[in-house]
Image (cartoon, rainbow, N blue to C red):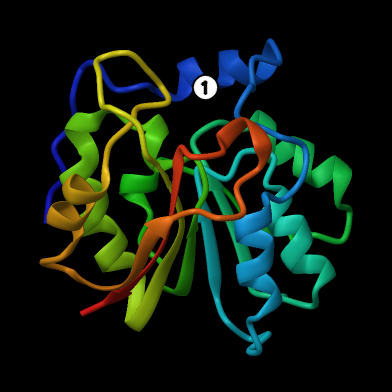
Amino acid sequence: MTYKKNKTDFDKAYWEHKYENNKTGWDIGYVSTPIKEYIDQLKNKDLKILIPGGGNSHEAEYLLNKGFKNVYVLDIAEQPLKNIESRLSQFPKNQLINQDFFEHTKTYDLIIEQTFFCALSPSLRENYVYKMYDLLNKKGKLVGLLFDFELTEEGPPFGGGLVEYIQLFYAKFEIKIVEKCYNSIKPREGRELFFIFEKK
């Protein structure tokens, strides 16, 4: 399948500029509580895991420290991957992927969504769903957080709501869980949904 692009998309230069100028307000400096608690209950350390739009990826660091070896971080910007490299010398360099998400072709057992969906132009949401489906192995899971506030033209981050998300994902994914997040970090309290979607 080909994925349509939009001239208003936030490109590599946009995100490189953000990192170079430390305009990374979405980066809280540690793994967020909902993602941490999900990781804590995972038993299979051999899972092949992707964190797309991973940025400085405190999630990847947490996974690594918990004994997960097959963790891949993908970002269109090079700077955050360099940041990971200098912060985590033990992180395999070949698992840091500087690439456009929509051009990536490997497959995974688990994909972690953390402030990537909301950073994309809303015109790409359907493409995101199809691409996630393609990147997951059979019965693979897409897990993470989606913002729960009105979608406007202002962003990133771009918002959305429960009904919209279910309509967007249900054709390709079994909706295991999608609910108000009870353990959000303070600044995001009441504005996040935690979800587990399994590839159909």
Identify which residue is drawn at 63% across, 30% down. Answer: 187
Secondary structure of the residue carrying tag 1 is helix
Above or below 118: residue 87:
below
* Residue 77, quarter of the rendered image: top right
Q: Is residue 150 left or right of residue 74?
A: left
List the residue tagged with mark 1: 15
Q: Is residue 49 left or right of residue 108?
A: right
Identify which residue is drawn at 27% across, 76% down. Answer: 199
Residue 183 in view: yes
Above or below 106: residue 3:
above
Q: Nearer the viewer, residue 15 or 172?
A: 172
* Residue 156, quarter of the rendered image: top left
Image location of residue 70, percent across then percent down: 64, 74
Q: Residues within 10 Å of mark 1 (few under 14, many from 20)?
A: many
Identify which residue is drawn at 63% across, 22% down. Answer: 25
Image location of residue 16, percent across then percent down: 57, 20
* Residue 119, quarter of the rendered image: top left
In which quadrant of the rendered image does the N terminus lie? bottom left
